[in-house]
Image: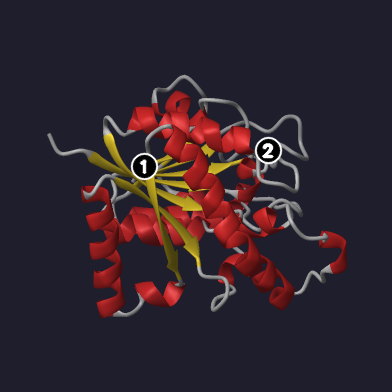
Amino acid sequence: MKKKKLVIKIGSSTLTAETDRISRGKIEDIARQVLELRKEYDIVLVSSGAVAAANQIINIHRWEKDVKSKQAKAAIGQPILLQIYNEIFRDFEIRTAQCLLTYNDFERLTSRKNTRNTINELLNMGYIPIVNENDTVSVKEIEVGDNDKLSAYVASLLGADLLVLVSDINGIYTKNPHLHKDAKLIVEVNDLKKVSHFVEERESDLGTGGMTTKLEAAQMCFDNDVEMYIVNGKGNNFLIDALSGKSHCTKFKK
């Protein structure tokens, strides 16, 4: 029976366990879940974390916080990030492949076709494609987005059944739960206009993606008939628990 297609976006705050370094324990947790979920899904990972990976080998206090410095750190950290993924996933006999993309790759017909064919062929060969933005030539993920919109582009291009955005929050609330204790989780969204006014951003050093970019990703998923979840990645087994209904999250269903 043909497997469903699942795109999982892992944000920097999840990969670092809310520190400034990549957490090997968290990636091991992800690998364990991917191994289980592969029984039902063909899986593509869209992973942030290149800048955080660079923090493990360089003195971060000597670097500026402008875009070009972040691009340089991303270039240093990207191979380190993939090395960590490869080492840990290999322990679970999961083979991985790197796909670096820019938003321009989704705008040109030939690039779209080549990207789709490459990712699908990797899936057919039993590999887990790990997608990230090519920050050396593109700055959109560094400036804003943290791969939220990139993952929606990937899910739409592949005709995925489900996109899961893994972040440091359970989903969209009636208020920002980091700022208001009486905020209530919205478990299902069918109309983005009804929830957009609930967005109240806060600054974070862990990642660049906020709820605004997640709603933009949701709109893209709505437009392309892709279901989308926002899931909290803090605890172990967060993907399986969300997909099985054991944990609370926001589901975007058109």
Q: In terms of secondary structure, where does tag 2 sit?
A: loop
Residue at position x 47%, y 19% from top?
246
Question: Disc 1 on helix, strand or loop?
Answer: loop
Q: In this view, does 143 lie above or below 85?
A: below
Query: From the viewer's perspective, is 188 left or right of 180?
Result: left
Q: Mark 2 points at which residue?
A: 17
Please name whichever residue, 250 or 133, is drawn nearer the observer in this view of the structure. 133
Q: What distance separates the C-alpha of mark 2 from that of mark 1?
A: 29 Å
Q: Against 253, is 215 above or below?
A: below
Q: Picture quarter containing residue 66? A: bottom right
Question: Does residue 249 show up?
Answer: no
Residue lying farthest to the left in this orientation: 1
Judge whether 242 appears above or below 65 on screen: above
- Residue type at mark 1 is Lys
Cβ–Cβ under 8 Å for marks 2 and 1: no
**What is the quadrant of the N terminus in the image?**
top left
Question: Which residue is denoted by mark 1 in the rendering?
Answer: 253
In the rendered image, residue 186, in percent from the top left (x then y), is placed at 53, 34
Instruction: Using a 10 Å C-alpha cutoff, classify the residue at mark 2 as few (fewer than 14 neighbours), some (14 to 19) or many (20 or more).
Output: many
Kindly identify which numbered label has been placed on residue 141.
Answer: none
The answer to whether residue 162 is left or right of residue 164 is left
- The number of discs equals 2
Q: Where is residue 30 in the image (x, y as percent from the top left)?
A: 50, 35
Going from N to C along the chain, the mark reached first, 2 or 1, is 2
Which of these two is toward me, 177 or 4? 4
Q: Which residue is pictured at 30% across the width and 76% down the height? A: 111
> Which colour scheme appears in the figure?
secondary structure
